Amino acid sequence: MSAGLIILDRDGVINEDSIEFIKSPEQWLAFPQALEAIARLHQAGWLLAVATNQSGLARGYFDEATLEAMHDRMHREVEAAGGLISHVVYSPHGPDDESETRKPKPGLLYQIRDLCQLEHLDEAWMVGDSLRDLQAGQSAGCKTALVLTGKGEITRGDLDQLERPDEVVIADSLLEFANRLLSDDPTMTDSRH
């Protein structure tokens, strides 16, 4: 029995983000604190998954094989640090495409729910650095956390656009989120119940 499920956004949460897009495995640079966080969570029994919008595919910036090579690098670095990411799902669609998988739509999170054979995501966390991560998480019924890496500082100013901004846990980094979750920090308890 796992401690639960944590769904992570990729760019800006696990690795450095770029307005120019991450287009190759060489440009995929993990945050050392994020690797440590994933390792700590995995070792504490949490199941970790990644849900990422990759519109660079639709824009022609890279192909599926290159994205797979980026994710291979991510898996290698996470596992070298003592962690494990069980599932990675992505949306290849651009912002103008009609897509149920592109966040803020919750389709990717439902894919993870099904891969994990869960009935619902009420006890799962969605951790991201952008408003659309949090919107997808809330739509899917997840508990939500904003990390202030990547676009997180900008996003913090936009939380009032969410239906339930008061339910978002804010952490400086994925490592701070992990440390608080694992220490039974009372501010991490679900305010919906």
Image (tube, helix red, strand yellow):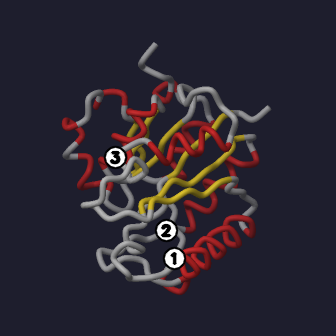
Q: Which residue is mark 1?
A: 29
Mark 1, mark 3: which one is toward the viewer? 3
- Tell me: 143 left or right of 129: right
Instruction: Give the mark nearer the N terminus: 1 vs 3.
Output: 1
Instruction: Identify the residue under disc 3.
Output: 104
Residue 20 occupies quadrant: bottom left
Figure check: 20 above or below 98: below
Question: Which class describes the residues within 10 Å of circle 2: few (<14), some (14-19), or many (20+)?
Answer: many
SS at mark 3 in the image: loop
Quarter of the image where one finds residue 166: top left
User: What amino acid is labelled 3 in the image?
Assistant: Pro
On the rendered structure, is 101 left or right of 178? left
CB atoms of marks 2 and 1 within 8 Å: yes
> Which SS class for mark 1?
loop
Residue 15 is tagged as 2
Q: From the viewer's side, name the closer residue of 28 and 180.
A: 28
Establish if 117 lies above or below 152.
above
**Residue at x 67% of width, y 56% of height:** 85
Seen as rendered, the residue at the extreme right is 1
